Each structure stands twice: as C-alpha cells, then as structure tokens.
Image (cartoon, rainbow, N blue to C red):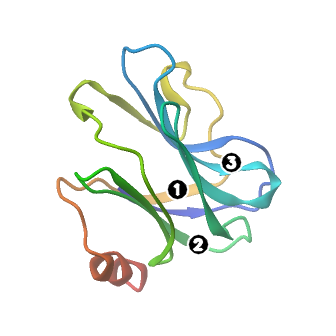
C-alpha cells in the first residue's frame, strides 16, 4: 500500500490508515506519530516500527507500507526503506480497512492532504517502490 501525503501538523495520532478484525485489541495502523512527524507502523499483537524521516514539512512525500508473506513489515518514505521488523504471519482475510482514521472507531483522522492511494495484490519490490517515488 502506498499514498502521497502532505502536512505541517504536529498533532498526535493522525492515522493515514487503520485496520481491525473481530478479535479484541487487534489493530493495525500507520500514523504520523507525535510532534516528530515520523511515520510508524503498529500492530497491537506485535509492536511498532518508526521511520527516520519526518513528513510534516509541508512537502509531498510517498509513504509506502510493505508486508511480505514471511511476516516482514517495512516502511518506505520517498522510495527509501526506513524501518523493518518481522511481525509474524497475519491472516488478512477477516480484516476491515479505513483510510485516514483509526480502526473501528473511525477517529483520529489525518490533518493534511492524501493523494494517489494505491493498494496492491502483491508485494512490490524495493525498485518498484523507488520508481513510484520519482513519478
């Protein structure tokens, strides 16, 4: 999944997207964390990873999330890998997704602009993600 984002906000917990299933406390989100403007990827059962780059500088940034079937999650900012962790295998068949909000509560929307949201049915290669960032 990838999307272009533009913001200058320093507000906490602005979700770019959220996902949840029917299990208690299982939520997956990517949001602009605290006033740092950094992107984090969170799953309540497995933990959190954070980008090194801030995206709240008023410029457009391509934020890309990559999940491989071996359980590895990665965050890319502007085509560059920023963070990686193995969260294990997740069955996505029963999940619900929402853009610019947090899970089933539909709260904490993103303060800024989102454009060109793309969801892929396969894992993009690092070079494909880089190519998207220079289009």
Mark 1 vs mark 3, CA separation in Å: 9 Å
Please tell me how crowded label 3 is: few (under 14), some (14-19), or many (20+) other residues with Cα within 10 Å: some
Looking at marks 2 and 1 on the same chain, the residue that comes earlier in the sequence is marked by 2
Question: Does dot 1 land on a helix, a strand or a loop?
Answer: strand
Q: Within the image, what quadrant is residue 112 found in?
A: bottom right
The residue that disc 2 covers is 60
Mark 2 vs mark 1, CA separation in Å: 9 Å
Give the percent coordinates (x, y) of residue 84: 47, 62
- The reply to whether discs 1 and 3 touch (Cβ–Cβ < 8 Å) is no
Please tell me how crowded label 1 is: few (under 14), some (14-19), or many (20+) other residues with Cα within 10 Å: some
Nearer to us in this view, 42 or 61: 42
Residue positioned 73% across, 60% down in the render: 37
Mark 2 vs mark 3, CA separation in Å: 14 Å
The residue that disc 1 covers is 114
Question: Does dot 2 land on a helix, a strand or a loop?
Answer: loop
Residue positioned 62% across, 37% down in the render: 109
The residue that disc 3 covers is 111
Query: Quadrant location of the C terminus?
Result: bottom left
Position of 86 with respect to 112 (left or right) is left
Position of 121 with respect to 36 (left or right) is left
Residue positioned 77% across, 55% down in the render: 9
Looking at marks 2 and 3 on the same chain, the residue that comes earlier in the sequence is marked by 2
Give the percent coordinates (x, y) of residue 4: 49, 65
Please tell me how crowded label 2 is: few (under 14), some (14-19), or many (20+) other residues with Cα within 10 Å: some
Question: Does dot 3 land on a helix, a strand or a loop?
Answer: loop
- The reply to whether discs 2 and 3 touch (Cβ–Cβ < 8 Å) is no
Above or below residue 88? Residue 64 is below
């Amino acid at each position: 999944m990838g999307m272009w984002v533009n913001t200058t906000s320093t507000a906490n917990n602005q979700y770019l997207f959220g996902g949840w299933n029917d299990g208690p406390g299982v939520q997956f989100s990517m949001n602009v964390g605290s006033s740092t403007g950094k992107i984090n990827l969170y799953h309540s059962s497995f933990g959190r990873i954070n980008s090194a780059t801030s995206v709240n500088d008023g410029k457009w940034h391509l934020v890309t999330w990559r999940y491989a079937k071996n359980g590895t999650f990665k965050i890319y900012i502007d085509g560059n890998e920023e963070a990686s962790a193995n969260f294990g295998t997740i069955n996505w068949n029963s999940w619900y997704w929402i853009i610019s909000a947090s899970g089933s509560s539909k709260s904490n929307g993103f303060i800024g602009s989102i454009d060109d949201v793309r969801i892929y049915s396969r894992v993009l290669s690092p070079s494909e993600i880089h190519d998207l960032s220079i289009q």
